[in-house]
Amino acid sequence: MNALWRLLLLAGAALAFSANAAPGDPDRGKLVYERCQACHALAYDRTGPRHCGLFGRRAGSVPGFAYSEAMRRSKLVWNAQTLDRFLSNPLKAVPGTSMGYAGIADRGERADLIAYLRQANGSAACGRQ
C-alpha cells in the first residue's frame, strides 16, 4: 500500500473517531473530576500535576513537578484523543507512569471529564476568561 493510501486511511479513521466520539458534558465532567481531586487540582500541583494549561501541553513538562521517567519520555501532547487513551488505562498508555490509577472505563465519563477540563482551562480558575 502506498503512502497516499495510508494517509487517506489514517485521515478516515481520525474522522470516524471524532464523528463517533461523544462531545461530553462539562457539568457531568465536573462530578467525575471530583474523583481526580484526591491527587490533582486545576491551578496547583498536588500528588499529581496541575490541570490548568493541560491542552496542548507536552506530557511530563510542568516545571518543578517530579514526573516519572516514563511520563517525561512519553512524547504525548495532551488533547482530547491522547487524554481519552490515557484516562482509559494510564498504566497501559504510559507503561511505568507513577499514576497508579486503573482508569475510567466508561467512554461517556471520559468524554465528560475531557469536556470539563477543556472548559476549566478557559475559566477564571485557570487565570482566563
Image: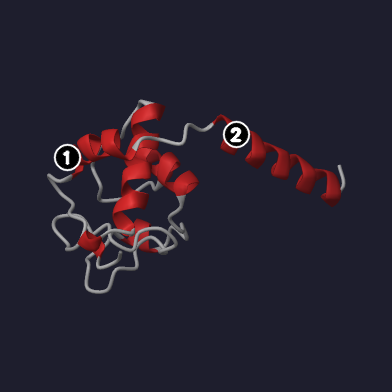
Identify whether 5 is placed above or below 54. above
Q: How is the image coloured?
A: secondary structure
Identify whether 103 is placed above or below 95. above
**In the rendering, at what x and y percent does residue 72 appear?**
37, 63
Q: Residue at x 36, y 57 (%)?
A: 70
Identify whether 48 is placed above or below 22. below
**In the rendering, at what x and y percent does residue 18 appear?**
58, 38
Image quarter of residue 41: bottom left
Helix, strand, or loop for circle 2? helix
Q: Is residue 64 left or right of residue 93?
A: left
Dot 1 corresponds to which residue?
34
For the N terminus, which image quadrant? top right
Image quarter of residue 93: top left
Residue 19: mark in rendering: 2
Q: Residue at x 37, y 51 (%)?
A: 118
Q: Amino acid at mark 1?
A: Glu
Q: Is residue 32 left or right of residue 106?
A: left
**In the rendering, at what x and y percent does residue 31 appear?**
21, 35
